[in-house]
Image: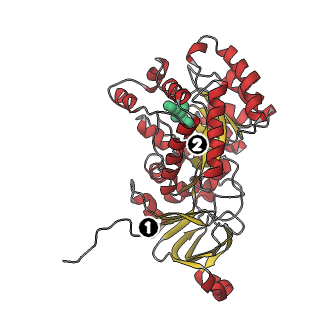
Amino acid sequence: MNKRPVWIKHAAQLATIAGGTAPRIKEGMSDLGIIEDGSVWIEDGEIRAVGTTAELEERYGSRAGDAEIVDASGRLVTPGLIDPHTHVVYGGSREKEFEMRLEGATYMEIMNAGGGIHATARMTREATEEELFEQSWKRLDSFLSHGVTTVEGKSGYGMDLETELKQLRVMRELNERHPVDLVPTFMGAHAVPLDWKGREDEFVDLLIREMLPKVAEEKLAQFNDVFCEVGVYTPDQTRKILEAGKAHGLIPKIHADEIEPYGGAELAVEVGAISAEHLLKASDEGIRKMAEAGTIACLLPATALFLREEAARGRDMVDAGVPVAISTDCNPGSSPTTSMTLVMNLACISMRMTPAEALVAATLNAACAIGMERRVGSIEEGKQADLVMWDVRNYQELQYLFGANHVDKVWKKGETVVSKEGEIRTQFVRA
Ligand SMILES: N=CN[C@@H](CCC(=O)O)C(=O)O
Ligand SMILES: [Zn+2]
């Protein structure tokens, strides 16, 4: 824990996103609570005060000598970004499938032939806990370097009790030892294991009978997710798994309407899911129901890009009143990226969300999608001091200068965990 307070001063724009813990909808998604010449006082890992630099001078000026002072002149400061949907703990890599897809194979063809999720499951089963820990640690470092301070992670590359528990235990240890907060989700129903093909209902029963109770007993997950998709789990099987999870205190999430329209958005509402993920093919009725119920749409535009699919209808969802969050979906098959900045850029470019909406979707609404809204997602007194200073002047520039990493500094619980000062060593000399 940083013993000295940190005083961030003179931010050109401090995007606080302050004002309540409910997910933002409609115009609320454009309200960034910007303070110009903004200032934040951080102490004991918490945000203690937020205001203009002049206001904080009055309150803390006498203590300036005790503090580490950070001059944020000309820069944007935001809450740490939050990634509410990842498959960050996995073994191996699938770059050959990427090539196969470019040569014409589809994602589902590769998976049905025993590749895809099954290939990663084989590599994850073979990996030791130490190997998974080390590989995933590096990915969490990469998230941090992109300004992401909280990440959700799913199991699902085992689909047998032993490997599911192994993935979840690795996540627990990462959460304890890595600065990033890692929020765990059980996803034993990520695919139908190859040796259970044709006996899907029996596998669902096994998952409910053996896996869910063990995961719950060891308190290894907060959420329960299912890949509800044509050729994977039907809506009925999904409902059964999620209802059983609820009885163990696990909150439902659904990979819904990703490849084919399948009533996944409607089912998310019916089972009281906190969020529905993907939604590329969600129906108008599903979107309407999600808006009515306040179910969060977790949209994954980098996945759509990487699979060369049309992105979800982010603009329509925001306009319909659905609370929208965005995420990398970091995984080895459909989105091997850790860049939430790219995801924000794509939210604007592929889904016609505005720069402000994209930032809310990657902070407060993302926090709400994983039940972390009381601790993170905005810059407010009492919240965890997770912040990013960006080398851009305003929030529009962050989305406009796309494809680059503009992170300058990242604080996690008040500690500097990324600092790019002096990283580039060229020297500009005017001719
Ligand atoms: N669609 C299902 N699951 C993951 C992909 C997992 C993989 O291909 O390894 C997703 O969310 O995109
Ligand atoms: Zn996913």
The residue closer to the viewer here, 381 or 181, is 181
Residue located at (39% from left, 55% from top): 402
Kindly state the secondary structure of the residue where label 1 is placed.
loop
Label 2 lies in ligand 2 vicinity (Cβ under 8 Å): yes
The furthest residue to the left: 431
Q: Quadrant of residue 213?
A: top right
Labels 1 and 2: the sequence-earlier one: 2
Can the viewer see residue 146 in this picture? no
Q: In this view, does 319 lie above or below 105?
A: below
Q: Name the residue under label 2.
A: 85
**Residue 116, position in %: x, y?**
47, 26
Q: How far apart are marks 1 and 2 (CA)?
A: 26 Å
Instruction: Indicate left or right for 161 with 340 as reference.
Output: right
Label 1 amino acid? Asp
Label 2 amino acid? His
Kindly state the secondary structure of the residue where label 2 is placed.
loop
**Residue 155, position in %: x, y?**
61, 34
The residue closer to the viewer here, 213 or 406, is 213
The residue closer to the viewer here, 404 or 21, is 404
Quarter of the N terminus within the rendering: bottom right
Q: Mark 1 points at which residue?
A: 391
How many neighbours does mark 2 have within 10 angstroms: few (below 14), some (14-19), or many (20 or more)?
Answer: many
Q: Quadrant of residue 400?
A: bottom left
Kindly identify which numbered label has been placed on residue 64. none
Q: Is residue 111 above or below residue 219?
A: above
Residue located at (50% from left, 69% from top): 76
Residue located at (66% from left, 38% from top): 169
Quarter of the C terminus within the rendering: bottom left
